[in-house]
Amino acid sequence: MKTSDLKNIINIPNVIELKNYHFKKRQIDDIHLFWVRSFSEVYHPKLAVKLLKLLQEDGFKVSLCMVGPENDGSLQKVKMLAKNLNVKVEFTGRLSKAEWHEKSKAFNVFINTTNVDNMP
């Protein structure tokens, strides 16, 4: 396909201010997972806990921090799953963007477990 064949193209700019998200090269020896969303079924928060368990079973030293407010009862379900799988998860509740940006500096893998996103 040639560029000239593309006639119906719309450029949707990224609404995220990239200057607020700094790249930091990290050495990854241990895996520190960071998840940020509201606790809602649509975002599949249980998947993050299942991932933690699978990575630990595969012999990785891994931790998980989940940041976000309760939305639809999912938070208690996720906490129960973590307890049943015998994995430790840090739950922070709602944090401001500045607070979770600062907290994210201690983590080396950002995970997104949703099938849907509202960003273009």
Image: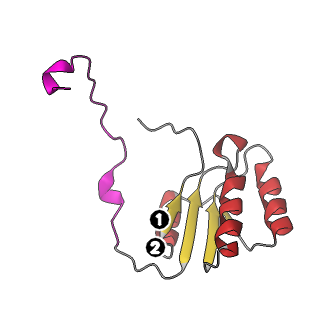
> Compared with residue 104, is residue 59 higher up or lower down, i.e. above or below?
below
SS assignment for the magenta stretch, majority: loop
Which image quarter holds the N terminus? top left
Residue 95 placement (x, y as % from top left):
59, 61
Q: Where's the C terminus, which quadrant?
A: top left
Q: Amino acid at mark 2?
A: Lys
Circle 2/circle 1 CB separation < 8 Å:
yes
Q: Is residue 109 above or below residue 75?
A: below
Label 2 belongs to which residue? 105
Q: Per the image, is 96 magenta? A: no
Decide which of 53, 81 is in the foreground and name it.
Answer: 53
Where is residue 107 shown, x and y percent of the image?
Answer: 51, 73
9 is within the stretch colored magenta: yes
Total labels: the figure holds: 2
Residue 27 percent coordinates (x, y): 40, 80
Could you tell me which residue is drawn at 65 percent across and 49 percent down? 38
Crowdedness of circle 2 by 10 Å Cα count: few (<14), some, many (20+)? Answer: few
Instruction: Report helix, strand or loop for mark 2.
Output: loop
Give the residue pinned by disc 1. Answer: 101
Residue 99 relative to residue 86: left or right: left
Which mark lies nearer to you, 2 or 1? 2
| 110 with respect to 113 (left or right) | left
Q: Which mark is residue 32?
A: none
Residue in view at x 52 percent, y 66 percent? 99
Against 27, is 93 above or below? above
Residue in the foreground of this view, choosing between 115 and 106: 115
Instruction: Magenta stretch: give its range.
Output: 1-24
Q: Looking at numbered disc 1 in the image, what kind of residue is underneath it?
A: His
Outermost residue, top direction?
7
Helix, strand or loop at mark 1:
helix
Q: Nearer the viewer, residue 81 or 100?
A: 81
